[in-house]
């Protein structure tokens, strides 16, 4: 059961009450009171969701996860929610008509990354409440911050507005997928369904809930994200008869080629001798350089995120080529990457084993920047390998999409700026997140909608052991789950106000 300290709850309520109410949020104190009353149920809802992991790579709980997502939408007040079949994991489509003049799109993911319980300090599906020194109390579990914590807070926000006897200031269109963690293999099929596409076309844009608050309480606005492509390269008896079908005695390497060495040689052609600069033929042909405004935003953001803290978080002591901090940030935002996620070949048990492996596989990813596309990147990879005679290297694309970007003066971004400025919250603007989400499906053709991230909550450990999301904050400048929920309440009202202003 969830245990929340009542003494901290009282402190939290006072802290939020001290934040100036936004003019666009009527009866804000009453809604806040409802949020606080519902906190226990909200935390339990998050724990319950964490306990049901959908892992697309393992084909785990895909049917159950979609049905659970549909139920969450209905429980939150969506009037219509249905499962949308795809060639892989199904999606979910839901609508909430509040009779408002403005309609807002919401993107959810209900899947999570894999996990190894042996690497965690508490069971990854338990959702245990733990103390984080200097920060407060957090919930620990797979999916806590990526993305079930922020999404639970958003659902709690629309519940609180309705439970307070009010209609939402915007209509909502929700689309959710269960394959984000494998690069959204079939999500485009969900959006292509006529009724889904029609509903989304009526929105002013789409946003994904996120945990974008720093330890000092400052916020971050992102204007886009890199694209991502996940793929595998395989060499072995299945790709050519010059390799053994299975592992054989290593003495045969004198007369039989090694698929492992062959794969290593192919991988080596993908980057320059420095080990990080992509060397695929024509790779930088459509890479758009940073604008002066983007460089200005990066420099401003560096002041709010100290280099020492970032290095400590990442566990590194230096950047590539010992570059200055701002240069490293420009590289992070502007450079496409070719990354090896893992290599699998041969025997890896204790001691040695005299075998010539029959198969070698590498799992890789591309991160793409404007104006690259998925089709372009895949085509260039295959042409690059073919040109060098690697016709025996099998390329399998498991998922992917291109980069996305939204203008700084769009309604979604203006609303974030206005909310932070009204609340006295310092913020930085990042031209592009180095991480990825399939926003291009919304702001690409045919929808051509603004797509952004928003959230004023805190968490960490995405894709790693001991993933966490802050529930009760010991710092009044940093939101726990109540503050995260109220931020979504406020955002919906500010979005409605900005949309109305733009329409006048």
Image: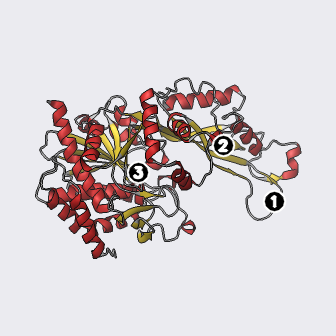
Inspect this view and state whether residue 436 appears: no
Tags 1 and 2 in contact by the CB under 8 Å rule?
no
Quadrant position of the C terminus in the picture: top left
Tags 2 and 3 in contact by the CB under 8 Å rule?
no
Residue 418 at what x, y percent from top left? 25, 42
Question: In the displayed structure, would residue 466 be above or below residue 291?
Answer: below
Residue 307 at what x, y percent from top left? 53, 48
Q: In the rendered view, does 331 fall on the left or right side of 211?
A: right
Q: Which of marks 2 and 3 is nearer the N terminus?
A: 3
Quadrant position of the N terminus in the picture: bottom left
Task: State the CA–CA distance, disc 3 to disc 1.
Answer: 40 Å
Residue visible at 49% across and 29% down in the picture: 372
Q: Mark 1 points at which residue?
A: 353
Q: Mark 3 points at which residue?
A: 178
Q: Mark 2 points at which residue?
A: 234
Question: In the displayed structure, would residue 262 be above or below residue 281?
Answer: below
Instruction: State which quadrant residue 204 falls in.
Output: top left
Residue visible at 39% across and 44% down in the picture: 86
Residue 292 at what x, y percent from top left? 45, 27
Count neighbours of disc 1 (C-alpha within 10 A) and say few if under 14, some if 14 to 19, many if 20 or more. Answer: few
């Amino acid at each position: 059961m969830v245990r929340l300290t009542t003494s901290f709850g009282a402190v939290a309520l006072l802290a939020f009450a001290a934040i100036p109410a936004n003019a666009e949020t009527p009866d804000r104190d009453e809604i806040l009171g409802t949020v606080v009353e519902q906190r226990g149920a909200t935390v339990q809802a998050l724990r319950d969701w964490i306990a049901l992991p959908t892992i697309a790579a393992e084909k785990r709980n895909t049917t159950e996860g979609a049905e659970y997502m549909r139920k969450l939408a209905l429980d939150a007040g969506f009037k219509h929610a249905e499962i949308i079949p795809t060639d892989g994991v199904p999606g979910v489509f839901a609508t909430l008509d509040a009779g408002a003049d403005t309609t807002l799109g919401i993107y959810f993911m209900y899947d999570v990354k894999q996990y190894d319980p042996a690497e965690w300090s508490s069971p990854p599906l338990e959702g245990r409440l733990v103390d984080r020194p200097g920060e407060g109390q957090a919930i620990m579990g797979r999916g806590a911050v990526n993305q079930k914590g922020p999404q639970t807070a958003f659902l709690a926000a629309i519940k609180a507005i309705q439970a307070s006897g009010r209609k939402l200031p915007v209509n909502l269109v929700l689309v959710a997928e269960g394959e984000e963690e494998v690069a959204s293999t079939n999500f485009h099929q969900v959006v292509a369904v006529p009724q889904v596409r029609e509903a989304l076309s009526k929105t002013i844009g789409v946003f994904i809930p996120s945990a974008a608050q720093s330890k000092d309480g400052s916020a971050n606005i992102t204007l886009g994200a890199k694209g991502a492509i996940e793929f595998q390269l395989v060499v072995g008896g299945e790709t050519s008869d010059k390799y053994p079908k299975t592992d054989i005695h290593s003495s045969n390497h004198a007369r039989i080629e090694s698929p492992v060495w062959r794969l290593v040689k192919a991988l080596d052609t993908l980057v320059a001798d420095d080990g990080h600069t992509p060397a695929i033929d024509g790779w930088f042909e459509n890479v758009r350089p940073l604008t002066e405004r983007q460089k200005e935003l990066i420099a401003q953001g560096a002041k709010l995120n100290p280099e020492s803290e970032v290095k400590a978080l990442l566990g590194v002591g230096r950047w590539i080529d010992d570059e200055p901090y701002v240069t490293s940030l420009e590289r992070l935002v502007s450079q496409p990457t070719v990354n090896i996620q893992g290599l699998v070949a041969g025997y890896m048990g204790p001691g040695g084993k005299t075998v010539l492996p029959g198969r070698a596989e590498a799992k890789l990813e591309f991160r793409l920047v404007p104006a690259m596309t998925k089709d372009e990147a895949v085509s260039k990879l295959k042409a690059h390998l073919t040109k060098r005679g690697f016709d025996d290297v099998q390329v399998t694309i498991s998922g992917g999409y291109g980069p996305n970007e939204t203008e700084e003066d769009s309604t979604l971004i203006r609303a974030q700026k206005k909310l932070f400025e009204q609340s006295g919250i310092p913020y930085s603007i990042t031209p592009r997140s180095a991480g990825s989400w399939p926003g291009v499906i919304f702001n690409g053709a045919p929808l051509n909608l603004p797509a952004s991230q928003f959230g004023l909550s805190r968490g960490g450990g995405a894709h790693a052991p001991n993933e966490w999301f802050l529930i009760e904050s010991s710092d009044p400048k940093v939101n726990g789950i109540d503050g995260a929920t109220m931020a979504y309440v406020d955002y919906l009202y500010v979005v409605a106000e900005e949309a109305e202003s733009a329409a006048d």
